[in-house]
Image (cartoon, rainbow, N blue to C red):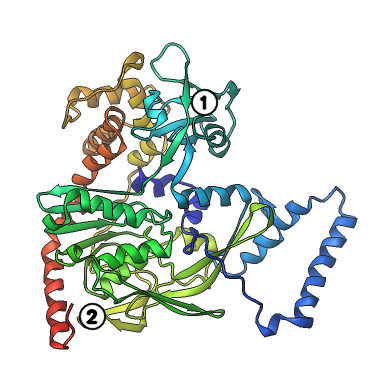
Amino acid sequence: MKIRQSVFVPVLVAAAAVLAPLYGPAVRAQAPPASQTGDDLESIQRSVMGAYALVEKNFADKVDSEKAFYGTGTGAGAIPGMLRTLDPHSNFVDPQEYAEMQRKMHAEYFGVGMEIFLDTASGHVIVTRPFAGSPAWKADLRRGDIITAVDGKDTKGMDTSAVAGMLRGPRGTNVRVTVKREGAPDYISVEVTRGSIETTLVDAFWVQPGIVYLKIDSFEAQNVSRDVEANMRRLGEGDVKGMILDLRENPGGLVSEAVNVAGRFLKDGVIVVSHHGRAEAEQMFRAKAVAAAQKYPMVVLVNEHSASAAEIVSGALQDHDRAWILGTTTFGKGLVQAQFPLHEGAALLLTIAHYYTPSGRLIQRDYSHSSFYDYYTHHDGETQNTQDIKATDSGRKVFGGGGITPDEKYPSHVYNLFERRTLGNLAFMHFGGTYWAGGAKPSLPANWQPDTTTVERFRTYLKTTSIPFTDEEFNANLDFIRQEIRYELYWRAFDKTTAERARWADDPEVKKGVESLPKAQSLLQTVQRVLAERGIHG
């Protein structure tokens, strides 16, 4: 439910999403500039260590040096505190977080193969999604199962990281998972053999004959561009007449993956993005074209949560007039982070440069006049820098400032109170657990739609919960209710991919994107004509 998450996920989680490193493992340890060497640097070091020595000697309780310098989940230590004075995206990552970041980047691990989350209301970790074909899937672990024990150890009160750590392990080893399933009279305990789990952040399907819908959840893994290529080969890119590229809710990730994805659609050798900083020489990243990806029109869907690498892609496609951008102004993250590992597995994510779109735009949103909290949570519409005017390949005006401004506005859905309450309290997910009474294997016919009886069954269920609502509210939201019931039950009866494909096919913005393909086609023809007149040929 990616598109729903921004409504409910705590601010700190949303903040962490845009901190995903743009460089992956590449680290370049630089000597300090001359102004911070010699006596100046030694003086600062003496001051820091002198302050710590005073604290260690005189504080009322024993001082934990790791806590003092690294901090805890409830407060910043010296290093995180220093980074917070710099910018919203420089960050300290503890060993557990850094290990998880590396795992996501490599998109492969050994375990049972499922997504889990902590239900704070019950204090239990719940299965969100067994990956299709994974050991968890084959063991019939299901969406909505409450994990009560792993290898006999009670999991109540544990967070998702702790439970995930118990589920992972060497390939071929066994782990016993005990769950409570709604409708089943007894606890269910299964032994699962761990395997190699490869994850993907990409999906593509025919949303209409000849029209491909390509969804990229993020760029945080090294297999994103590879999976884009695999999906396009599977569909047959030569048959594509138009593409909807969905980057909504995409928080960014690796520069290399963004460059590879954007570059396949662009003319060979053109600039995708450039960056430079105080200690970084300017670097330009250029496109490596895919011949079959040059011919069809594209519409890119973005919103205020499209950030970082997603803005690199949308900015490059806009500046080269390769795609029509539809949606709301993007987040506005034009800062580049590199990973600098510390001892004991921790790391710094340090901003080392600004990046610029091919036309030379800096799209970083201003954070100098507000708190970092406001920076992450408030998107006040237009933040263009009217003094930073650039031009696309065909001569259209584009502006720097905060984010990528779409060519055509399409407002994000604003959730009403009923929608927020039902989604925030996981009403549809819990209803899905009661739908197949007694723990029966979920099954639905193809193209199933919830009928009146199913909707009324949900109304009856909702009255058994603590979620306040009126019949008037319920009746006013029937379309939303049907959509969410279908999504939840499709997920259980088939898999997440099937559920999401059904959702995206009916998404009003996707439909608007299809309607906007002629504008993208006109844009593509215009830039080809302009470049030909300049003597530039693809």
Residue shown at the point (49%, 38%) measured from the top left: 110
Q: Position of residue 99 (x, y in %)?
A: 57, 49
Side (left or right) of 428 relative to 254: left
Dot placed on the residue nearer the N-terminal end, 1 or 2: 1
Q: Farthest top residue?
A: 185
Q: Position of residue 516 (x, y in %)?
A: 14, 62
* Residue that label 2 marks: 393
Q: Could you say which is closer to the camera, residue 20 or residue 86?
A: 20
Quadrant in which residue 348 is drawn: bottom right
CA gap, disc 1 and disc 2? 57 Å
Residue shown at the point (17%, 56%) measured from the top left: 237
Q: Position of residue 13 (x, y in %)?
A: 50, 50
Q: Position of residue 253 (x, y in %)?
A: 43, 59
Side (left or right) of 57 relative to 378: right
Location of the C terminus by quadrant is bottom left
Q: Which mark is residue 403?
A: none
* Residue that label 1 marks: 174
Determine whether label 1 and label 2 are within 8 Å by CB.
no
**Badge 2 amino acid:** Asp
Quadrant in which residue 491 is drawn: top left
Q: Farthest front residue?
A: 172
Q: Could you say which is closer to the camera, residue 382 or residue 340?
A: 340
How crowded is the residue under tag 1: few (<14 C-alpha within 10 Å), some, or many (20+)? some
Q: Is residue 112 above or below residue 206?
A: above
Quadrant in which residue 45 is drawn: bottom right
Q: Is residue 186 above or below residue 480?
A: above
